[in-house]
């Protein structure tokens, strides 16, 4: 991105302007620079609210220069909604962010993601469930996305990292701030082995109202959202409801009727969330969702997946007609977890297809 364009986007990061109106303006043949040149009356004729010109003019060069100091490495990015690096799924939600600040591997934003959210004070069982589900899903190729909050969020991120996998943390502050403070080391790990993401301008401090807003990004980038444990009134349920409104899958782990942190999950299940007891159930569903995303993704085509010998062998165990998972396990002699992971990768790369009763080979 050219320096002038970057300065314009940084200025916009400090202005409350909707992404959809901005896109409509740009797609009408206008340049980003023109937005800063037009009078307030002209901007209103393009559908913007009164006062935008004054707001744009209020962003000082000194503030932009200060923002630019943050970009001190090749792993710090600003990704506008017009960029090919902007996640396609996020662009589909009703109110996508106009831009994203990213610290880490920006390519992960276009990878297949599964969101894991839950209580800030999970039970011992909730912690264990989070670790196991995150580990299995990450090992199957999904990027674990969450909000880096205490409790379930942090445990999910750490489980992915501990198993050598990738994770994305969407935060409610500027990326030059770390919250909560006790997650400083975790944030550093994520920036090195995944990505930290925020729509908020650099310098944005902790503000309670920002966290529900960022939740739409967590579920908006993800194929599905898993709620591990949640009370009836919690941020996790906000995220789950947003996912449902976005037309994304929501998964919930059931618990004891005597556990207050299970009530949120039970409520979601009553509303149509899928009850899951194992990560493999999500993997099976995720494969179909990932195939859907690939078919509808307007980004550059991914490179051809090269089958290693073990995957070639696994492919031989799948017939042209419907083959049950049990049959594949019996033929391969491998554990169900290993088989599930390999089948997911084969499906994501269009070697097999998920059908009622199992899988069938398509090439």
Image: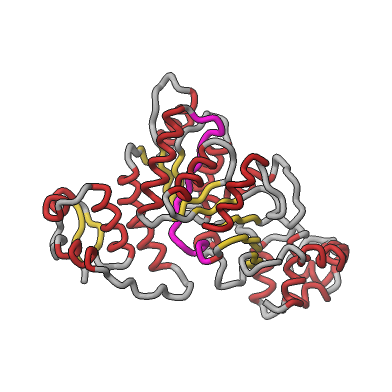
As drawn, the residue found furthest toward the top would be: 258
Identify the image's colour scheme: rainbow, by chain, secondary structure or one colour: secondary structure
Q: Quadrant of residue 278?
A: top left
Q: Is residue 170 magenta?
A: no
Query: What is the tally of numbered marks visible in this picture?
Result: 0
In the displayed structure, would residue 17 be above or below residue 145?
A: below
Looking at the image, which is closer to me, 92 or 301? Answer: 301
Residue 206 appears in the picture as rendered: yes
What is the x, y in percent for residue 189?
A: 56, 52
Residue 120 lies in the magenta stretch = yes
Specify the quadrant that holds the C terminus.
Answer: bottom left
Along the line of sight, which residue is nearer the eye, 169 or 294? 169
Q: Quadrant of the N terminus?
A: bottom right
Q: Residue at x 37, y 41 (%)?
A: 274
Corner quadrant of residue 51: bottom right
The reply to whether residue 80 is in sight is no
Q: Residue at x 56, y 53 (%)?
A: 190
Q: Position of residue 93 (x, y in %)?
A: 55, 57
Which quadrant of the figure has residue 49?
Answer: bottom right
Numbered range of the magenta stretch? 107-122
Residue 176 position within the rendered picture, expressed as x and y whole percent measured from the top left: 71, 54
Q: Residue at x 61, y 47 (%)?
A: 185
The image position of residue 303, as x and y in percent, is 39, 75
Q: Is residue 35 above or below residue 321?
A: below
Q: Is residue 73 above or below residue 205?
A: below
| Left or right for 89, reference 8 | left
Residue occupying image coordinates x 84% and y 69%: 41
């Amino acid at each position: 991105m050219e320096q002038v364009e970057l300065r314009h986007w940084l200025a916009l990061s400090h202005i409350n302007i909707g992404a959809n109106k901005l896109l409509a303006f740009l797609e009408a043949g206008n340049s980003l620079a023109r937005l800063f040149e037009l009078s307030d009356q002209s901007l209103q004729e393009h559908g913007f609210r009164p006062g935008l010109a004054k707001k744009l003019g209020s962003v000082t060069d000194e503030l932009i220069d200060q923002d630019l100091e943050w970009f001190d490495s090749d792993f710090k990015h600003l990704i506008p909604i017009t960029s090919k690096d902007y996640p396609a799924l996020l662009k589909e939600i009703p109110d996508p962010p106009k831009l994203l600040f990213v610290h880490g591997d920006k390519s992960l934003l276009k990878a297949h993601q599964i969101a894991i959210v839950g209580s800030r004070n999970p039970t011992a069982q909730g912690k264990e469930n989070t670790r196991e589900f995150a580990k299995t899903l990450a090992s199957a190729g999904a990027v674990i996305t969450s909000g880096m909050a205490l409790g379930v969020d942090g445990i999910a991120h750490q489980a992915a990292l501990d198993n050598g996998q990738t994770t994305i943390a969407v935060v409610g502050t500027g990326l030059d701030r770390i919250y909560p403070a006790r997650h400083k080391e975790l944030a550093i790990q994520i920036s090195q082995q995944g990505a930290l993401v925020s729509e908020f301008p650099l310098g944005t401090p902790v503000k309670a109202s920002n966290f529900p807003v960022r939740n739409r990004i967590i579920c908006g980038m993800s194929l599905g959202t898993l709620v591990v444990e949640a009370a009836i009134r919690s941020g996790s349920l906000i995220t789950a409801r947003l996912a449902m409104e976005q037309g994304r899958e929501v998964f919930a782990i059931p618990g004891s009727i005597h556990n207050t942190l299970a009530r949120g999950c039970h409520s979601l299940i009553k509303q149509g969330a899928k009850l899951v007891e194992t990560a493999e159930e999500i993997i099976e569903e995720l494969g179909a969702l990932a195939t859907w995303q690939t078919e509808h993704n307007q980004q550059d085509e991914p490179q051809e997946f090269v089958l290693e010998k073990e995957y070639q062998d696994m492919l031989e165990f799948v017939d042209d007609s419907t083959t049950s998972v049990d049959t594949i396990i019996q033929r391969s002699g491998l554990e169900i977890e290993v088989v599930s992971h390999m089948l997911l990768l084969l499906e994501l790369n269009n070697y097999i297809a998920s059908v009622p009763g199992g899988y069938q080979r398509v090439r």
